[in-house]
Image (tube, rainbow, N blue to C red):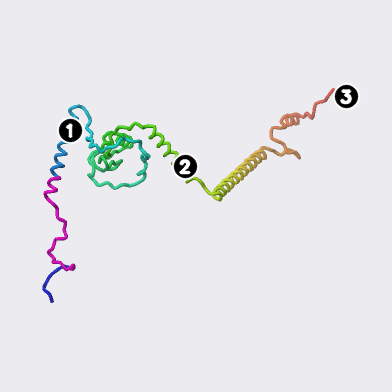
Amino acid sequence: MSDNKGSAYGQPATDTSFRRNYDLDEYAEKAKIREATEKEEAKARYEAKMAGKKYYKPMTGDETHTRARRQVIDLEANVGKTVLVPAGAGQGKRGRGAGFYCSACDLTFKDNIQWVEHVNSMQHLRNIGETGEVKKATAEDVHQRIAEVWERLQEQKKAAATTLKERLDMREEEATKEREARRLKRQEDLAKKKAEKEVADKVKVEYGDDVRIEGEHDEDDMMAAMGITGFGTSKKK
């Protein structure tokens, strides 16, 4: 029996060669570069503030021209949803909190007006790699844009196109709905006429063998009450 104590993988229990080794000098150099960059940015911010200007992130030369937004800003994506936010994750606008969060600028906004203004601001455009300047379109660019829009419209038409059977089924469904609407209207008309007839029957009163409408023979009733059976006439027969 061997006295060698080892792990289940056949290596000594004290072996830590599987752990990652970090180059301390490399990370120290990265820390120095980061500190120098932060000092330069703080100095630029201070100088811009003293000059009464707003500080923007300096351009690196890799930025592109600002283009029109291709997608619609969805302001109702989180309506009715519950989002868990760690306590103390954000301080003021800085950091991720409850509201509209911009990952490029690490800012959170509480209402949609501030959010839209931020998305269109120079600060946001610089952080996403745009210059904030719009490229002047040439005739070739205009033709290309028209061709793209036309192609998109054709694709939408193809997607909306249906087979003959589907169109017939849709027409049959529409005809069924129209018939049902006409049937309901007929029922409403019949119910209305029936209600009017019932009201008219309630107004009628019994008078001898006649069925008279109330108020129709008021003058005859008055003459009968006074004992007058009728008026004579001078016309000879």
Residue linked to disc 1: 44
Residue 93 at x, y percent in the picture = 25, 38
The answer to which image quadrant residue 113 occupies is top left
- Return the residue at label 3: 236
> Magenta segment, which residues?
8-30
For residue 168, side relative to residue 48 (left or right): right
Quadrant occupied by the C terminus: top right
Give the mark count: 3
The reply, left or right, for residue 165 in relation to residue 224 is left
The x, y position of residue 103, in whole percent, is 27, 42
Q: CA distance from mark 2 to mark 1?
A: 51 Å
Dot 3 alpha-carbon crowd within 10 angstroms: few under 14, some 14 to 19, many 20 or more: few
Q: Nearer the viewer, mark 3 or mark 2?
A: 2
- The answer to if 15 sits in the magenta stretch is yes
Quadrant position of residue 152: top left
- Residue 137: x, y in percent? 36, 32
Upstream in the sequence, badge 3 or badge 2? 2
Q: Can you say whether 123 is above or below 156 in the image? A: above
Residue drawn at x 80%, y 26% as measured from the top left: 231
